[in-house]
Structures are given as C-alpha cells and as structure tokens.
Image: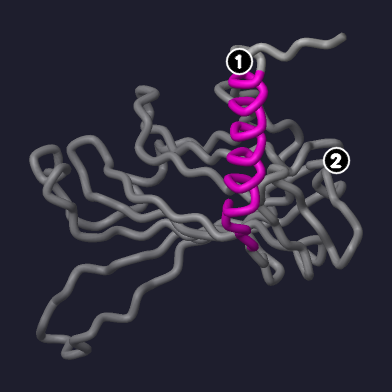
Amino acid sequence: MRVTTKRSLTAAVAVSLLAIGFVESSAAMPKKVRDYDGEVEFITDGGIPNGPCLRLSGRMKGDFFDGLRRIDDAEGTKFLRGQLRVTHFPEKVLLQFVIRDQLCPEELKSTAAGSPYLTPEIMRPLRLTFYWKRGLELRPARGVHELISFAERVEPYDKDPAANLPERLTWNYEFLVPSAGVPLTDHFVIILRAQEGRIVARVAARL
C-alpha cells in the first residue's frame, strides 16, 4: 500500500504552483517585433581632443534587409523573412555614414577648444577601424573596401557674403563589408581614432 505523507503532498503542490507560475510568466512575456525596412541605422556623438565635437550617423543596408524582421519572445531571439528563419549575414553588406561637427554637450565642453568646425586639417590624421563584436570579443573586420569618401560643403543659413562665415563640411563615406558566415547576433563596430590612438567616436550597427 502506498502512503503519501503530508511533506510529499506539500512538495508536490509547491512544484505544481512553480510550474504554473513559469507558464504564466512565459505567456505574459511581451513579444517584440522589429522590421528593418532595408537598413540598420546607427548614430553616436564624439569629440576631437582639443577640438570640435561631432556626430557620426549612418546605416548598414542592402536587399538582404528587405522584409527581414527580428522577433524577441519567451523563446528568445530569432530573425525571419516571411516564415523562413535567417541566421547569418549575406556575403557582403553596404555601409554608409556621415561625420559632421555639432555643438558640444555639457560633458564635453571642457575638452573642446580651438576650431568648432571639422576642417581637413583636423580630419586628416583620424583613422577608421572596423570590427565584428560577439559578446565582449572584438575581432577585426577583414577585407573592408572603401567605395566613396568625400567632403561636402554645408550651405550656410546666412548667405550674405558680408557675414564672412567659415566654411563647414560634412564627411561622407561608403564601404563594402564582407560578411559571409557572420551570425546576425554579431555587431559591426566602427571606431574613429585620433592620431595618438584615443577613441574619438565609437558606434555599433546591431540588429
């Protein structure tokens, strides 16, 4: 004859309640959906040592991102195109971004000095480096190919020649990034460094 003790009944009830609570918690977890509409945007602010502050903004784009969506739910994160599950980047992606000067935020005002604008003399020594990031690991992005880099004049608000306003420029870049075999959960990191190696700006394109 099987004897059920009070202690075993209590344990069974506790396990049942825990299981019910887990199911309810999982069911209550909100489902988040993100559509990329052909591109992954990124933006960050930075500052030149003893120079102007800047903004770096752009996008990772390509046909691959058309119809791609990210879903976060109780089961974790997955990427879908329609009903098809996608796990890796395509062979290559296009990277476009612009660097422009801007007013310094309060936390950077004490380090800003000299020209408030990005000039060719300021930009020339800066170096761009690219990485893939997985967790805390940064690994160099190999084979990144520059397609376009040019400076473009910003039209002043006051077009009176007597105003004698300094020339302002934006700095435009386009790169082709090899990405075959890279999981969609990896981040593409852009780092802009000053000549002495100090990081001027850092941003990640992340899905």
Height in image: 15 above or below 33?
above
Instruction: Determine which quarter of the picture holds residue 51.
Output: top left
**Residue stretch rendered in magenta on the structure:** 9-33
**On screen, residue 35 above or below 11:** below
Image quarter hosting the N terminus: top right
Q: Mark 2: give few (<14), some (14-19) or many (20+) Cα within 10 Å.
A: few
**What amino acid type should be assigned to the residue bearing mark 1?**
Lys
Residue 6: image tag = 1
Total marks shown come to 2
Counting from the top left corner in percent of width and height, residue 153 is at: 39, 72
What residue sits 66% from the left and 32% below the top?
16
| Residue appearing at x 77%, y 38% in the figure | 183
Q: Which mark is residue 180?
A: 2
Camera-side residue: 166 or 76?
76
Amino acid tagged 2: Ala
Q: Nearer the viewer, residue 157 or 4?
A: 4
**x then y, percent, for residue 25:** 58, 45
Chief secondary structure of the magenta portion: helix
* Mark closer to the chain start, 2 or 1: 1
Q: Residue 54's x, y, as percent?
A: 31, 53
- The residue lying toward the viewer, choosing from 44 and 156, is 44
**Furthest residue to the front?**
1
